[in-house]
Each structure stands twice: as C-alpha cells, then as structure tokens.
C-alpha cells in the first residue's frame, strides 16, 4: 500500500520503519528540517516496562479518592490553559475503577516495545548510545512504602524491581555522592536507557535504504478524502494515499480528526540539560531517578542528561528558573563533578501530548484510511517500537502480538 506518515519524531520514524519492513511504499512528512526535532529531541532516555517515572502514569490510588485528588501531581500550570486542559488534569488525577487494567495496558505495551526495540536493533544492526538498568532513589521510608502496591503489580507482571539499601545501591552506582542521604532504592535490571534521537536518525537511513521517501520542511495542513485519504501540504499540494498514519505529537492535534473532539489531550512540557561528562568515574553508569525531586540523571554516551519539570499549557512556556535550578541542584547533590559545563551545554524544553487515561491512541480513526499513533505522554520513547509494530500489523490485517483494544482511538466517544 501507499502510506503517508505525518511526523518524523520517534513515533513517526518507528511507524515508517515497520511499514517499510512490511513492504509498503512509505512517505514521511515533517514540518521541521530533520527527524526528532520536537519532543523526541533530548528525552531522558528511560526505556522499559517499569513505568516508574512520576509522569509515566497517574497517582497510584492507594490513598482515598479525596487525598488522591488533593495530592500534588508534580505538574504545574503554565501559559494558555484551556478548559480541556483542566478536564484532562481532573481525569489524570482521578484513578477511576479501571486503574489497574489501564496500568496493565501501558506496562504490557512498554515491555513489548522494549522487546521490539531490541529485535530491531539486532535485525537492522543499529548501534546507539544505551545502557542497562534503572535505579529509583527514595529519600524516606514512607516514599518507598507508598510505592509498594505498584511494585507488587510490576513484580507480578515480570518487571521485577529489587529493593536495595544504600550500600547495595552504591555498588550499582558507585559515583553517587558519599554524602547523599537516602533511605533506599528500587532497581529495574531489565530496563534500559537509550538515545532516542540517535535511534530515530538511524531508522531514517534504513527507511531511505528500503525506498521510503522523507519530505522535510513539509507541513500537512489538512486531511480530506471521502473514500481514501488525501493530505494537503503547504508546499507540495494535495496528495492521495491508501492510508495515512498521524504520528504528529503535540502539534498534530490541530489536524481535523473526528476522534480529537471527544478527548481532552494535554500538552505537558518538561526540560532536560545535557553536558559532556568531565570525569566518567563521577557519572552514573545508567539512569538514576530521584523520586523526591522527580528528576532523572542519565548517561547518554559521553554526555550526562538531567531532566525533570512538568508544565501544563497549550502555549510554549519557557523553562522556569525553578525547574532549571532543580536540575542543577540534583546533579550537584547526586553526581558532583560529573559534568563539564564549561564546554557545550544544552538546555532544552519539549512538549509531549498526554491522553486522560495515560494510554496512547493507536489504531484506526473513523475517517476512511486514517490511522492514529500519538499521545504517548511521558512514555513515547518507551512505547514507540511496540506501538509502531501494532499499527503496522493492524494495517496489514494481521493479528497483533499483544491486545490493542485498550488503545483504540475511538474509546473516548460518549
Ligand atoms: C524532557 C523530556 C524527557 C522525556 N523523557 C522520556 C523518557 O525518559 N522515556 C520516554 O519514554 N519518554 C520520555 N519523554 C517523552 C517522549 O520524548 C515523547 O513521548 C516522544 O518523544 C513523543 O514522540 P512523537 O514522535 O509522538 O512526538 P514528536 O517527537 O513531537 O514528533 C512529532 C513530529 O510531528 C511533526 N508534525 C506535527 N504536526 C505536523 C504537521 N501538521 N505536518 C508535518 N509534521 C508535523 C512535528 O514537527 C514533530 O517532529 C520525555 C519528554 C521530554 C520533553
């Protein structure tokens, strides 16, 4: 089939790769000049099924409904807040009866995705910056106990998290500052850290090798077509395809897709700071997430990346001074001397799109020939390879490796 993919972030590139692998004729349309220039540009790199980042999934409902809804979500209010954002925030903070099923759906997709990423990396001989394992640090016992339920469920699902005391933690991450005071940690040996942007660039080469076309600097302005889809572009006119897959991240929600009317999709921005490692012995071996400050420090090849902060709002909000201060403070307290800020340092803010039930929209739209693969929230890198394989199998009419019904784009229609 002749298939258009809108968006060349990590979701668009993995989707185009899988479709090309299945023998389709793929054309990618991207408004920027290259791949992974938006949310996929400098993400923290966490990959895998633990979904332990505070933004990966809403508050665990062990507390009463009232306590849960009063609890801070770690998401601050930015500029251009709409009624839809408030509806999203309310839904995000309300656990709902199907909380465990939804968590199960997200965890299954992320675990499947990591498996798929490993297969692609071997099949396509992709060499990219990656490291094994993720640690989550708890400052106090109560912080760790509050996560007991989540850990039990993860352990049942095979995403085993091992609780470690500080001495055991330091064996895994010997560069953690000796003066850092923390109660315990949980270690996910099967999770990984990987360079999302680098992976997207490597896929670009494979897509081109298999005959796929990439159209950069080409914004898709509208979708149309009564029986088969047509896309209107800013500089290439109107083009017809057998299928169109929208992987257009936070900006893509402006496209005229019927499903978007029924769902409050939110734009949440986070920040990362990347710098060269000054002394490898002072840097993390893989990723360390500080639960208390919700900040992660990860190794990205010869660089270190600190990321955190979460701001809700449709308008671009410049990284707050508070977030930046928090990122530098966490690096200083956890891995002092690891980064060399005198050479090139990059401060970057990216916006991801979040659905109210924390699951992405993956599957067919009611518009003929139009498919969606978006709204992966803070798990876009973790879920991209799995979601891409699911959509490729669905488009080819094959059965999928995991159940994709919870991800149906039409699930929000009243
Ligand atoms: C600081 C930070 C840290 C993160 N850490 C992690 C992490 O550790 N693990 C994890 O799994 N996830 C993480 N995330 C989330 C993850 O980065 C995103 O979920 C993921 O990058 C989304 O990918 P995407 O391809 O859907 O969107 P994007 O990367 O935003 O790509 C969408 C693309 O579509 C293009 N586009 C949009 N509209 C149009 C149009 N009309 N025409 C043409 N092109 C269009 C855009 O230009 C863009 O390039 C993090 C995010 C941030 C900001």
Image (tube, rainbow, N blue to C red):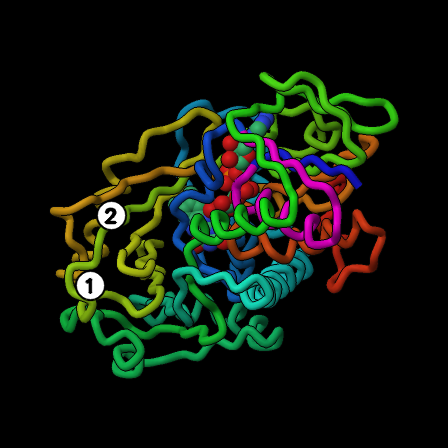
The residue carrying mark 2 is: 326
Q: Is residue 331 left or right of residue 405?
A: left
Residue drawn where x is 45% and y is 76% of the image: 189
Q: In the rendered view, does 205 fall on the left or right side of 401?
A: left
Residue 207 picture location, percent across and down: 60, 47
In front of the other: 117 or 254: 117
Left or right placement of residue 152 versus residue 36 in this view: right
Residue 383 visible to the viewer:
yes
Residue numbers of the magenta segment? 8-30
For label 1, the crowd category at 10 Å Cα-Cα, with few meaning under 14, some 14 to 19 and many 20 or more, is: many
Q: Secondary structure at mark 2?
A: helix
> At 69% across and 55% down in the image, what residue appears?
389
Return the residue nearer the eye: 17 or 56.
17
Seen in the picture, residue 22 relative to 320 is either above or below; the reply is: below
- The answer to whether residue 24 is magenta is yes
Residue on which disc 1 sits: 335
Kindly report the distance in space between the C-alpha atoms of the residues bearing marks 1 and 2: 14 Å
Asked if the residue at label 2 sits under 8 Å from ligand 1, the reply is: no
Q: Position of residue 333 (x, y in %)?
A: 18, 60
Q: Secondary structure at mark 1?
A: loop
Quarter holding the N terminus is top right
Residue furthest to the right in view is 227
Q: Is residue 248 visible?
A: no
Q: Locate residue 218, reporting x and y percent.
A: 56, 25
Whether residue 81 appears in magenta in the rendering, the answer is: no
Question: Total marks drawn?
Answer: 2
Q: Closer to the camera: disc 1 or disc 2?
A: 1
């Amino acid at each position: 089939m002749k298939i258009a993919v809108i968006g060349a972030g990590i979701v668009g590139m993995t989707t185009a790769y899988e479709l090309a692998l299945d023998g389709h004729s793929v054309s990618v349309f991207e408004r920027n000049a290259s791949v992974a220039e938006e949310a996929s540009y400098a993400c923290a790199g966490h990959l895998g099924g633990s979904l332990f980042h505070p933004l990966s999934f809403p508050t665990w409902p062990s507390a009463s409904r009232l306590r849960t809804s009063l609890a801070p979500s770690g998401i601050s209010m930015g500029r251009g807040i709409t009624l839809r954002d408030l509806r999203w925030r309310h839904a995000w903070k309300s656990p709902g009866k199907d909380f465990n099923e939804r968590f199960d759906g997200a965890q299954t997709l992320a675990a499947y995705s990591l498996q798929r990423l490993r297969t692609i990396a071997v099949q396509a001989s992709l060499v990219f910056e990656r490291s094994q394992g993720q640690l989550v640090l708890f400052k106090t016992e109560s912080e760790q106990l509050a996560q007991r339920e989540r850990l039990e469920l993860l352990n049942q699902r095979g995403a085993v998290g091992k609780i470690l005391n500080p001495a055991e933690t330091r064996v895994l991450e010997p560069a953690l500052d000796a003066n850092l005071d923390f109660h315990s940690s949980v270690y996910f040996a099967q999770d990984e850290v990987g360079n999302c942007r680098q992976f997207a660039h490597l896929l670009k080469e494979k897509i081109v090798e298999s005959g796929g076309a990439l159209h950069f600097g080409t914004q898709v302005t509208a979708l149309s077509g009564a029986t088969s889809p047509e896309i209107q572009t800013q500089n290439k006119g109107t083009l017809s395809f057998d299928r169109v897959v929208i992987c257009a991240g936070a900006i893509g929600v402006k496209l005229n897709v019927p499903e978007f009317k029924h769902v409050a999709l939110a734009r949440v921005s986070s920040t990362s700071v990347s710098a060269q490692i000054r002394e490898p012995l002072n840097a993390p071996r893989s990723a360390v997430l500080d639960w208390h400050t919700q900040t992660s420090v990860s190794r990205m090849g010869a660089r270190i990346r600190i990321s955190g902060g979460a701001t809700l709002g449709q308008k671009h909000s410049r990284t707050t001074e508070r977030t930046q201060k928090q990122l530098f403070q966490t690096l200083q307290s956890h891995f002092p001397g690891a980064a060399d800020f005198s050479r090139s340092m990059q401060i970057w803010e990216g916006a991801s799109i979040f659905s109210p039930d924390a699951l992405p929209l993956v599957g067919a739209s009611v518009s003929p020939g139009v498919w969606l693969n978006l709204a992966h929230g803070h798990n876009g890198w973790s879920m991209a390879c799995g979601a891409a394989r699911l959509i490729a199998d669905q488009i080819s009419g094959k059965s999928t490796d995991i159940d994709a019904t919870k991800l149906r784009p039409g699930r929000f229609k009243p």
